[in-house]
Amino acid sequence: MRYVALLRGINVNGQKMVKMDLLKSIFEEMKFENIKTYIQTGNVIFDSQEGQKDSLCNKIKDKLKETLGFEVPVILKEIEELEAVICDNPFKNRTLLENEKLHVTFLEREPSGESAEVLNDYKTDKDEIILQGENVYILCRNGYGKTKFTNSFLESKLKVKGTTRNFNTINKIVELGRNNK
């Protein structure tokens, strides 16, 4: 099975620095195959024979903590799940303006209905946000750095961990995942 581990909080603002060579070697130690990293924010594409996603995710989290000395939240997705994120993009029929950027926050699990409804209280004209299952699509009109819909904000409102990637990165990860065998 082809997976992508989306790591949260490494190599951001000079914090929790992890070289991609080290990250790759950690995944090699876990006996994963066809390992590829993409950009410094912690995207690891790999093959595993283990079919149980939850136990596989816990194995990765435990190994990262053991090796790096700090916890790293991990969202584990199959390549097909990322392809579905691209296909199900609620903004796909819209041409983005020059200053608009699309991001997706991947959540560990689907938030409760109560938590999800809370997002409606924070909608603005500045940015658009759409929750679809375990994914939050964020259309940022002035860049992700200026949106209120950050990881921390979404985690606090939805009561679930998440990590965000821009849409171009998601497309590139899928491309690498499909061409890396």
Image (cartoon, rainbow, N blue to C red):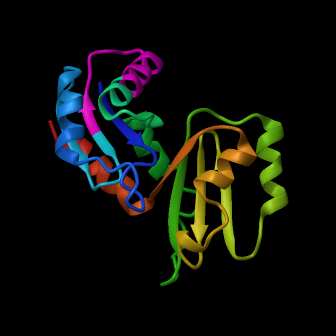
Left or right of 176, for residue 9: right
- Picture residue at 70% right of the left edge, 36% below the top: 111
Check the picture and name the quadrant holding the C terminus. top left
Check the picture and name the quadrant holding the N terminus. top left
In the displayed structure, would residue 2 be above or below residue 48? below
Nearer-the-camera pick, 4 or 178: 4
Of all residues, the one furthest to the front in this rendering is 69
**Rendered location of residue 38, percent (x, y):** 26, 51
Residue 8 found in image quarter: top left
- Picture residue at 38% right of the left edge, 48% below the top: 16
**Rendered location of residue 128, percent (x, y):** 67, 66
Residue 79 in sight: no
**Rendered location of residue 168, percent (x, y):** 38, 62
In magenta segment, residue 49 = yes
Residue 65 in sight: yes
Left or right of 82, for residue 178: left
- Picture residue at 48% right of the left edge, 37% below the top: 73
Magenta region: which residues? 45-62
Residue 51 found in image quarter: top left
Left or right of 67, for residue 103: right
Nearer-the-camera pick, 142 or 92: 142
In the displayed structure, would residue 23 be above or below residue 60? below
Of all residues, the one furthest to the bottom in this rendering is 98
**Rendered location of residue 169, percent (x, y):** 36, 58
Q: How many marks?
A: 0
In magenta segment, residue 27 = no
In the displayed structure, would residue 48 be above or below residue 133? above
Left or right of 133, for residue 52: left
